[in-house]
Amino acid sequence: MDRDQWISNELERLEEEYDIKIIYAVESGSRAWGFASPDSDYDVRFIYKRPKECYLKLEKSRDTLEFMLPDDLDLSGWDIDKALKLLHASNPSLIEWIRSPIVYKTTPDFDLIANQLDRYFSVRTGAYHYLSMAKNNYSTYFRGDTVSVKKYFYVLRPILAARYILKTKTPPPVPFDELAQAEMEQELQPYIDELLAVKRAVKEMHPIPRVKTVDEYIEENLRQIETALSHLPRETSLAWGPLDELFCRLIGVWDR
């Protein structure tokens, strides 16, 4: 059985066991980013909806499903009500799901959600998210003379994503190669190619000597992005109306 069929079977099992309908399922994390290691998990993320009656109860119900299955299959999903609230907040994780290059399942219902992305995308929220991720990973993991090769990409990718957002005012591509092509300086590319080759060949936490040229690039870009963000204007909160209407359509209580 190939990977896609295996994952499809597990998603169908969840639908039956939990009485849900999965409207979208994708790969996230290092496999979607394009730099998986030989021992990387399969990080499958999905959006689901429940029967209409479940949304018409006063008692709050669970809006997240999470499972770690054998063979390194990590499944995690959000109910449509949670997904739409996160879309209103321009949640970067949800946006990466929406733009993942590895799609296991999609539906017309999901297309209705994806069509709202441009309306609710926040430059400020996205850029701050990726800057914070890069800064935290750099300060946490880059302390000694060696570092896991994985951590270089956990700093470089958010730096490139923040740069892309600030330049284009749009959501960044998910694959690292696309981000690097759009944002990476040419003189740095040989160092990145070498790091990528190591990342794809060794286990997740394989340590390597730190690369001075790349470290300098990281530190300079963290400063530049922080300065650029300090000059961004405040954004006004967007109306809930389009998402309220979409939610009603998706659960079948209002169809027009």
Image (tube, rainbow, N blue to C red):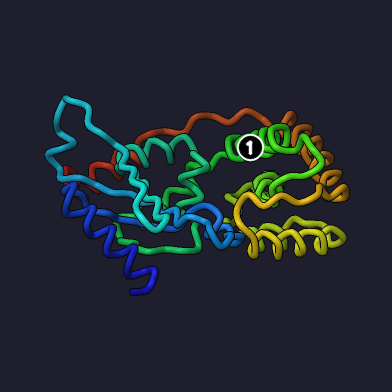
User: In the image, residue 197 lies at what x, y percent?
Assistant: 70, 65
Which one is nearer the viewer's eye here, 56 or 187? 187
Q: Residue at x 67, y 46 (%)?
A: 151
Count of picture labels: 1
The answer to whether residue 236 is seen in the rendering is yes
**Quarter of image, res 147:** top right
Q: Which residue is mark 1?
A: 133
The answer to whether residue 165 is seen in the rendering is no
Q: Amino acid at mark 1?
A: Met
Vertically, is 157 above or below 88?
below
Which one is nearer the viewer's eye here, 175 or 119? 175
Residue 214 falls left or right of residue 31: right
Image quadrant containing the N terminus: bottom left
Which one is nearer the viewer's eye here, 53 or 206? 206
User: In the image, residue 188 lies at what x, y percent?
Assistant: 84, 58
Q: Residue at x 69, y 33 (%)?
A: 140
User: In the image, residue 75 lies at what x, y percent?
Assistant: 36, 50
**Quarter of image, res 138:** top right
Residue 29 falls left or right of residue 12: right
User: In the image, residue 59 lies at what x, y percent?
Assistant: 17, 25
Disc 1 crowd rating (10 Å Cα; few below 14, some 14-19, many 20+) is: some
Circle 1 — which element?
helix
In the rendered image, the residue lying farthest to the bottom is: 1
Q: Residue at x 18, y 36 (%)?
A: 55
**Quarter of image, res 175:** bottom right
Residue 23 falls left or right of residue 149: left
Which one is nearer the viewer's eye here, 142 or 45? 142
